[in-house]
Image (spheres, grey):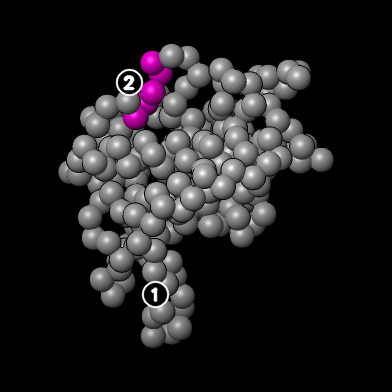
Amino acid sequence: MPGSFAGVPVGHKMRRMNGYRIVASRERGPGRPRTRYHRIVSVTGPLQLIQVFANTLDASPGADQLGTREEAAAWLRAAGLLPAEAGLSNSEHAALLRLRGSIRDVLAAHAGGREDADAAARLTRALADGRLVLTVDPASAVQLASAARSSYPNLVADIAVAIARSAASGTWPRLKACSVQQCGQAFYDESGSAAARHCPAHAGSL
Ligand SMILES: [Zn+2]
């Protein structure tokens, strides 16, 4: 079902330097036309990766694109987060679901305008798997990289860097999970007040 991966960003590039895998994502300017993805997600850049990852769990029961190890690996490959030959172990699959769950809980806290120390701690722990380091090349160019060689830590590093970039650009607090209990979909709050609590589909909800 290739169409189900259409919301996934493809701008991630991977390369290695000094033995570290450099984590880099192509930035897209706001308002720039997006070819086949523009109907599915409205945000651009690093935020989009986090949003589509969070939304792999749909509101309808049983609609989890990462539900099994195989499904998760297929989704990650289509997203460019996992090499074609790589899979996920059971423990990596469980860690991936914990990572997603902690992101969704943090986004729910954003929507609620509250702090969630437990979710923040879980997200911090889950992102530690990415083993991020800073590399400095001879020309003194500085880049974030993953110190890990295996594929799972590298994909966590991609997500960690996406979060760091969105936080640096100030968009992270505006990425929220819809407060409607049966929904929980991640959305980008474009309101002037930054106080939206519901996704566009539930914008009229109390
Ligand atoms: Zn909603």
Q: Say which label, 2 or 1, has the lower sequence index.
A: 2
Percent of width and height locating residue 3: 39, 23
In this orientation, which residue lies closer to the viewer: 171 or 92? 92
Q: Is residue 150 above or below residue 32?
A: below
152 relative to 117 in the view: left or right: left
Percent of width and height locating residue 191: 77, 37
In this orientation, which residue lies closer to the viewer: 167 or 18? 167
Q: Residue at (21%, 37%) from the top-left corner?
A: 90
Give the number of the disc on residue 135. Answer: 1
Q: CA distance from mark 2 to mark 1?
A: 39 Å
Stretch of the chain drawn in magenta: 62-66
Image quarter of the N terminus: top left
Q: Residue at (51%, 32%) from the top-left corner?
A: 37
Percent of width and height locating residue 136: 41, 79
The answer to whether residue 149 is magenta is no
Q: Is disc 2 placed on a helix, strand or loop?
A: loop
Give the number of the disc on residue 1. Answer: 2
For badge 2, the amino acid type reads: Met
Give the number of the disc on residue 196. Answer: none
